[in-house]
């Protein structure tokens, strides 16, 4: 292939990917006819360009524009194929469904989560009558269900049923469920749950109903429709049971989750503490079936098959003389890696890797010399055409940038390469691996800061130890356990010294560094500099690019001017969490809810949010003890060791042990930060002195915080109810510009006198989508609207940002970052 032809193809592939990227910016999808018309116009334009035969440069530009339009249209049509969501009239209604469990269920402390394909569905009205539902227009066929129970280890009342029986992939069940639209939390630079559901083609979520009046779930049959998923589940359950039963095998059971992830791809089996360790040392990519594992499996399989194919000549097999061993090995490696990816759950990372390997192998078999950049771009274009939304996932960028860097530096793996021979060859390869790991670590550091706000300074050393140990020892032993269970014990034994070493590395000073996540433009500049640093470029170029690293390394989120403040009401669901920032100080008011025994707003929302903003909070104020206000407190306090704790919690509360020098909220307390006044208005000393037993409602002692400067003020009211509101009014409550609506908009709060005394311009409601309490209550909503108050709900707004310098406006994350896969709450 000539250089000019290769450049033309490369430009065309980049143009195709650019069209995909542009379509992902759409806020709403067009009609089918609009995309078809765009594709037709693009095709017609391409035909005209070909007829006119313009100059090569002009023709290239025109063809690029045509490909941009064509890929835009194709991606839009792809998106329309999965845009059917649940009819709003069916949300929260009792539905009887019959369907099949699609994939291996995920075990949780209180039940199961699993994908379910609905075959039949009926709506059940209060009288018991049922109506068939049209799966083509009213209800998506693929949903994500939870079946929860209570196993005696958790007392927060997640469900009234016993722990449900195991659910297996391929089984057909009759269930009574309640479903809702795929709605998640939307915070600045946070995890986009709705995008994840969209990419998985899941258009509704819900849970199994197991109340006294509900029919019991019924297992109808084992269909055999998903044999690989059934096999995965069988292997996972056998693995976990075997390691738990090993005599004196506490350490084996401790590592069973990692081994299960390496064998079956079940990342949920890994404990949160283990994930924290792996991220801190930069080896998280090794501890589940990822693109690296699939690629290494393909490489090893191709080498073994090619070796056997060469030896088959000695056995008299004539076919070995017709087809070259490298080509046979490459094809066999691709096929066997496909089976491995299927067994691992056919996750999105494995799918991307398989498409990339397929492109590389096909081009290799063409017996033509293909430039590395063209192979790389073609693989990326194929992956994005199949899964356009991969472009928005960190894994796509990390894997493709790593491969691109290795290609550019001459270290990319060749699927047809011969096995190494001789000690010197192996030593040379070992040195090359060290160099490759160094190059990838340096090049991907800016992306790590961009996506995660964290970089592991021990990552290079940890990976040099962990990659060969996990890839060539732990993973083969774990896979061998599928046919011989004793190998799982050996794999667990092999993980123990690695865990000890990683724990030791994580304890080093500055083993990992967290920084504020810089804007995309700054990260792109830093990535450009990192690429120049690892390429064979002149020293002068490398020195000149170093200033490009400065914005990423030292960027800080802009803070309010002195004498002003801002509030960020995080989108945490049914609970409160408000970040208050002044010029040099920060306070977090409440820490959101606990979602389940293994998940809370601290780990899922607040800790990542504070990290990406580079926030070091001075004070965590917990208004009262309810779990929807304290659920994430332990995680926040652990990650913010300098933060002081203020609360109205009773003496002896477990959270106080994390901050023995805590302060109790009492009316009359006040302080000034950067010209901004903070005042505690409630509770009074006599109220806080009462023992908090069943006769004392925690809501009654909620910390009420007023924040003000010369021209604007805000009131954070916790869960106070009518008696406390009227007492505040009687004490001379002053108007504010913003009010955090008390008790999430409950009927027991937001009394008329209270609202009229405050006269807020903006009232923010933090409540979960379709929460079981019905917050905010409709009479409360109408009360605010009747007074002309702008009522902002997190379910419609996402994270809400308000600044005292512009007290009449609220910045909604759902408005600013809206994309077509985001759920719009019906009016």
Image (tube, rainbow, N blue to C red):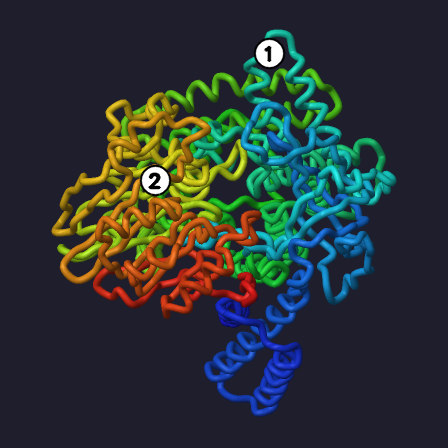
- Residue 249 is labelled as 1
Q: Looking at this view, is 424 or 672 the one in front?
A: 672
Seen at 75% across and 51% down, the residue is 117
Q: Which corner quadrant of the image does residue 89 belong to?
A: bottom right
The tag earlier along the polypeptide, 1 or 2, is: 1
The residue tagged with tag 1: helix, strand or loop? loop
Quadrant into which the C terminus falls: bottom right
Query: Foreground mark, 1 or 2?
Result: 2
Q: Which corner quadrant of the image does residue 784 belong to?
A: bottom left
Q: Is residue 200 left or right of residue 618?
A: right
Q: Looking at this view, is 479 or 212 the one in front?
A: 212
Provide residue 425's location: percent of width, then percent of height: 51, 31
Q: Residues within 10 Å of mark 2 (few under 14, many from 20)?
A: many
Quadrant into which the N terminus falls: bottom right
The residue at which mark 2 appears reads as 702
Q: Is residue 803 above or below residue 54?
A: above
């Amino acid at each position: 292939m000539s250089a000019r032809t290769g450049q033309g193809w490369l430009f065309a592939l980049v143009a195709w990917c650019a069209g995909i990227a542009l379509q992902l910016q759409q806020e709403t999808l067009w009609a089918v006819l609009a995309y078809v018309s765009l594709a037709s116009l693009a095709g017609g334009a391409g035909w005209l360009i070909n007829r006119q035969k313009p100059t090569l440069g002009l023709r290239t530009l025109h063809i690029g524009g045509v490909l941009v339009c064509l890929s835009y249209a194709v991606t839009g049509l792809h998106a329309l194929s999965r845009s059917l969501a649940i009819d709003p009239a069916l949300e929260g209604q009792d539905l009887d469904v019959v369907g099949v469990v699609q994939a291996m269920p995920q075990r949780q402390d209180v039940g199961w989560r699993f994908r379910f394909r609905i075959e039949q569905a009926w709506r059940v009205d209060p009288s018991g009558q049922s109506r068939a539902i049209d799966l083509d227009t009213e209800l998506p066929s693929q949903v994500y269900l939870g079946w929860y129970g209570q196993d005696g280890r958790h007392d927060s009342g997640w469900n009234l049923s016993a722990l449900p029986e195991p659910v297996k992939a391929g089984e057909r069940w009759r269930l009574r469920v309640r479903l809702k639209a795929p709605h998640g939390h939307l915070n600045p630079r946070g995890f986009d749950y709705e995008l994840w559901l969209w990419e998985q083609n899941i258009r509704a979520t819900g849970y199994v109903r197991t109340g006294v009046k509900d029919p019991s779930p019924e297992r109808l049959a084992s269909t055999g429709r998903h044999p690989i998923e059934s096999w995965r589940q069988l292997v996972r359950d056998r693995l976990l049971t075997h390691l738990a039963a090993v005599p004196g095998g506490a350490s084996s059971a401790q590592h069973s989750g990692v081994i299960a992830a390496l064998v079956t791809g079940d990342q949920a089996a890994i404990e949160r503490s283990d994930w924290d360790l792996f991220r801190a040392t930069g080896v998280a990519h090794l501890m589940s079936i990822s693109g690296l594992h699939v690629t290494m499996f393909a490489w090893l399989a191709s080498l073994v098959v090619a070796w056997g194919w060469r030896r088959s000549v000695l056995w008299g097999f004539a076919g070995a003389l017709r087809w070259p061993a490298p080509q046979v090995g490459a094809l066999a490696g691709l096929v066997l890696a496909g089976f491995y990816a299927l067994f691992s759950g056919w996750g999105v990372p494995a799918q991307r890797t398989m498409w990339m390997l397929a492109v590389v192998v096909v081009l290799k078999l063409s017996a033509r010399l293909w430039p590395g950049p063209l192979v790389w771009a073609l693989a990326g274009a194929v992956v994005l055409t199949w899964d356009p939304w991969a472009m928005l996932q960190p894994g796509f960028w990390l894997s493709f940038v790593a491969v691109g860097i290795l290609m550019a530096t001459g270290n990319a793996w060749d699927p047809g390469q011969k096995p190494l021979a001789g000690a010197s060859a192996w030593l040379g390869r070992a040195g090359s691996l060290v160099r490759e790991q160094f190059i990838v670590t340096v090049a991907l550091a800016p992306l790590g800061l961009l996506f995660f706000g964290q970089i592991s300074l021990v990552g290079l050393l940890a990976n040099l130890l962990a990659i060969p140990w996990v890839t060539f020892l732990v993973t083969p032993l774990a896979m061998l356990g599928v046919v011989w269970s004793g190998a799982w014990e050996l794999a667990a034994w092999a993980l123990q010294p690695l865990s000890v070493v990683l724990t030791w590395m994580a304890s080093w000073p500055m083993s990992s560094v967290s920084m504020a996540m810089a804007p995309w433009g700054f990260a792109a500049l830093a990535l450009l500099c990192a690429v120049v640093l690892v390429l064979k470029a002149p020293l002068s170029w490398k020195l000149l690019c170093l200033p490009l690293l400065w914005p990423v390394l030292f960027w800080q989120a802009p803070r309010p001017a002195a004498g002003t403040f801002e509030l960020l009401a995080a989108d945490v669901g049914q609970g409160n969490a408000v970040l208050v920032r002044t010029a040099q100080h920060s306070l977090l008011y409440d820490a959101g809810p606990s979602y389940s025994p293994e998940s809370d707003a601290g780990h899922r929302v607040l800790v990542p949010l504070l990290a990406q903003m580079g926030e070091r909070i001075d004070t965590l104020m917990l208004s009262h003890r309810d779990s929807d206000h304290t659920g994430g407190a332990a995680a926040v306090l652990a990650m913010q060791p300098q933060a002081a704790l203020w609360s109205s919690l009773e003496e002896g509360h477990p959270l106080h042990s994390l901050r023995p020098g805590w302060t109790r909220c009492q009316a009359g307390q006040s302080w000034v930060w950067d010209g901004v006044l903070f005042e505690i208005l409630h509770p009074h000393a006599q109220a806080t002195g009462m023992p908090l037993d069943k006769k004392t409602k925690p809501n009654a002692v909620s910390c009420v915080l007023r924040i003000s400067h010369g021209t604007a003020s805000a009131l954070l009211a916790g869960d106070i109810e009518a008696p406390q509101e009227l007492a505040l009014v009687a004490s001379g409550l002053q108007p504010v510009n913003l009010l955090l609506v008390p008790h999430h908009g409950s009927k027991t709060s937001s009394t008329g006198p209270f609202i009229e005394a405050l006269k807020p311009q903006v009232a923010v409601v933090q409540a979960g989508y379709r929460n079981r309490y019905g917050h905010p209550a409709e009479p409360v909503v109408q009360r605010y609207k009747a007074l002309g108050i702008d009522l902002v709900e997190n379910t419609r707004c996402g994270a809400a940002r308000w600044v005292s310098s512009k007290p009449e406006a609220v910045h909604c994350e759902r408005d600013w970052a809206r994309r077509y896969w985001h759920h719009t709450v019906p009016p």
